[in-house]
Image (spheres, rainbow, N blue to C red):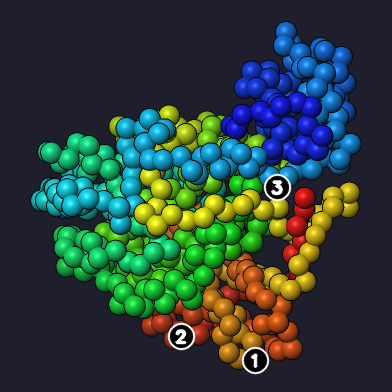
């Protein structure tokens, strides 16, 4: 977590000050008393009791707070318990750090920054694991590694659920280890493609341009199936259509775990997971299909970037270790996220927990200390993105809020995605003409996906200028990627009872 500020702090917030006042020892001690000091909600609810104890010097045991720290906590109570945002100093220092300063042994770099020798090493490693396909039971062969994502069975991958980022971090680490199993490639690292930049020429050539299945995997994908992509100009256009860059930028402004991810626990579906889904849909028929997406070689560079983005967010909000991460999770509204890090049986990230890497949700939190993995900055330096206040449609009465009447959130909800075979697009129409589009990434048979079944009812959020939706009739149209079932328009009556709502989001301080 970021370094604690100098006390007293006149106007502290949860993110920049209060959560940093509790040490790991304090947190562990109070958990035995039934109080979770990583939870904003619990600390706020128990603030009076906490203040009484620290003011009386009875807490923390043996290491009482100074008078200035006690005054800081009282100031927070007096100000109405503001949640705030992470400390700007910690944010800037983290994002501005040059490559390698963390001391990590594995520093993954932007593809566009690699030297000719580094590119040659990556190519050699890929060719090496492709060659291992002569034995499809080899745990380091390409076929086996790609198959962990979905087909062939058993089915492991996690999407649209709290385990999404931890699972994929473990996946990238396991795949990188496979690359390192190739003789002469023991030090290779998995580069990333910064998806806000053009599709890399390096990935347009063999062995990265396509992959042909050496065996049947089920789901209609037989031996000889060759991965395909859209034309590269179309990929660029699709990324704009699905607002991938805008969703990424929005995600990096969020302070809460739920808002950074989006989609679950009432959070708008317009941040990191929406960007992920849109990115898959933008690249091509193979990447758009969860059943086979990982067989397209671009998948690995694509997801290395997604792991980088999660790590950048973790550093910005002081969530690079367990207690820091838990302090960003709203336990009351998102118990599932809290539990995947605190309940041992739920920490498993199969198959990687059972494989030699033995990774769990706990073990992947600190990428540098636990995995020895860090990321170099993008080749094209991006400006620092300031953290924003939490966006919501409603807030407690005692919290102060601000609004931007120039923008509106259109939400299409109640769409039963189990009824839709495979990935699909959701178009927002005004007077019959599309004005915005989102993409949902899912398997061809979502009813066979445990996570899909648990999260069957999908919602889609469109953050738009108010002027773009005013004075017209709004409709939502679902277009499945596989149009052979019902054509390009999926019947509304088959999706459940979808609804459209419009709101002007408010921001809390």
State whether residue 116 is above or below residue 82: below
Q: Is residue 200 visible?
A: yes
N-terminal of the two: label 2 or label 3? 3
Horizontal relation, residue 503 to residue 259: left or right:
right
N-terminal of the two: label 3 or label 1? 3
- Please tell me which residue lies in front, 119 or 435: 119
Q: Are marks 2 and 1 in contact (CB under 8 Å)?
A: no
State whether residue 300 is above or below residue 431: above
Circle on res. 333: 3
- Mark in the foreground, 2 or 1: 1
Q: Residues within 10 Å of mark 3 (few under 14, many from 20)?
A: few
- Please tell me which residue lies in front, 352 or 111: 111
Q: Residues within 10 Å of mark 2 (few under 14, many from 20)?
A: some
Question: Which corner quadrant of the image does residue 336 belong to?
Answer: top right
Circle on res. 67: none
Q: Residue 259: percent from the left, percent from the top?
A: 63, 53
Horizontal relation, residue 494 to residue 103: left or right:
right
Horizontal relation, residue 366 to residue 302: left or right:
right
- Label 1 sits on residue: 431
Q: Are marks 3 and 1 in contact (CB under 8 Å)?
A: no
Q: Is residue 336 visible?
A: no
Q: Are marks 2 and 3 in contact (CB under 8 Å)?
A: no
CA–CA distance in space, label 2 to label 3: 36 Å
Q: Which structural element holds mark 3?
A: loop
Q: Which structural element holds mark 1?
A: loop
CA–CA distance in space, label 2 to label 1: 19 Å
Q: Residues within 10 Å of mark 1 (few under 14, many from 20)?
A: few
Quarter the N terminus occupies: top right
Q: Which structural element holds mark 2?
A: loop
């Amino acid at each position: 977590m970021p370094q604690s500020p100098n006390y007293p702090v006149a106007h502290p917030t949860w993110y920049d000050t209060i959560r940093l006042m509790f040490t790991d020892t304090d947190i562990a001690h109070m958990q035995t008393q039934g109080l979770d000091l990583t939870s904003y909600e619990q600390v706020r609810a128990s603030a009076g009791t906490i203040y009484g104890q620290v003011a009386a010097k009875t807490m923390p045991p043996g290491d009482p707070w100074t008078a200035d720290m006690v005054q800081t906590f009282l100031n927070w109570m007096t100000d109405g318990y503001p949640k705030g945002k992470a400390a700007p100093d910690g944010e800037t220092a983290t994002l501005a750090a040059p490559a390698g300063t963390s001391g990590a042994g594995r520093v993954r770099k932007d593809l566009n920054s690699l030297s000719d020798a580094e590119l040659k090493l990556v190519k050699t490693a890929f060719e090496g694991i492709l060659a291992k396909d002569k034995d499809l039971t080899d745990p380091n062969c390409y076929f086996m590694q790609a198959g962990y994502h979905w087909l062939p069975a058993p089915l492991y991958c996690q999407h649209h659920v709290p385990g999404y980022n931890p699972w994929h971090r473990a996946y990238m680490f396991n795949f990188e280890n496979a690359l390192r199993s190739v003789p002469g490639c023991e030090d290779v690292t998995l580069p990333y493609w910064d998806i806000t930049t053009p599709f890399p020429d390096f990935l347009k050539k063999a062995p990265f341009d396509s992959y042909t299945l050496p065996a049947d995997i089920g789901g209609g994908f037989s031996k000889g199936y060759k991965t395909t992509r859209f034309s590269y100009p179309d990929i660029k256009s699709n990324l704009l259509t699905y607002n991938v860059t805008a969703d990424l930028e929005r995600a990096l402004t969020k302070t809460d775990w739920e808002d950074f991810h989006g989609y679950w626990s009432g959070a708008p579906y317009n941040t990191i997971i929406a960007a992920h889904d849109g990115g898959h849909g933008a690249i091509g028929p193979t990447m758009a299909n969860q059943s086979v997406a990982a067989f397209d070689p671009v998948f690995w560079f694509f997801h290395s970037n997604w792991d980088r983005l999660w790590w950048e967010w973790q550093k910005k909000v002081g969530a690079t270790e367990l207690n820091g991460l838990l302090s960003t999770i709203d336990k009351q509204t998102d118990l599932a996220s809290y539990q995947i890090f605190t309940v041992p049986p739920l920490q498993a990230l199969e198959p990687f927990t059972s494989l030699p890497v033995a990774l769990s949700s706990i073990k992947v939190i600190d990428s540098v200390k636990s995995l020895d993995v860090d990321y170099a900055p993008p080749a094209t330096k991006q400006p620092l993105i300031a953290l924003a206040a939490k966006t919501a449609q409603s807030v407690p009465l005692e919290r102060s809020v601000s609004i931007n009447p120039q923008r509106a959130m259109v939400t299409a909800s109640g769409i039963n995605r189990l009824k839709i075979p495979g990935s699909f697009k959701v178009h927002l129409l005004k007077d019959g003409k599309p004005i915005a589009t989102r993409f949902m990434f899912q398997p061809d048979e979502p009813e066979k996906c445990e996570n899909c079944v648990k999260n069957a009812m999908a919602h889609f959020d469109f953050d738009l200028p108010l002027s773009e939706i005013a004075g017209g009739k709004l409709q939502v149209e679902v277009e499945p990627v596989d149009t052979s079932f019902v054509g390009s328009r999926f019947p509304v009556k088959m999706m459940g009872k979808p609804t459209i709502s419009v709101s002007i989001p408010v921001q809390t301080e």
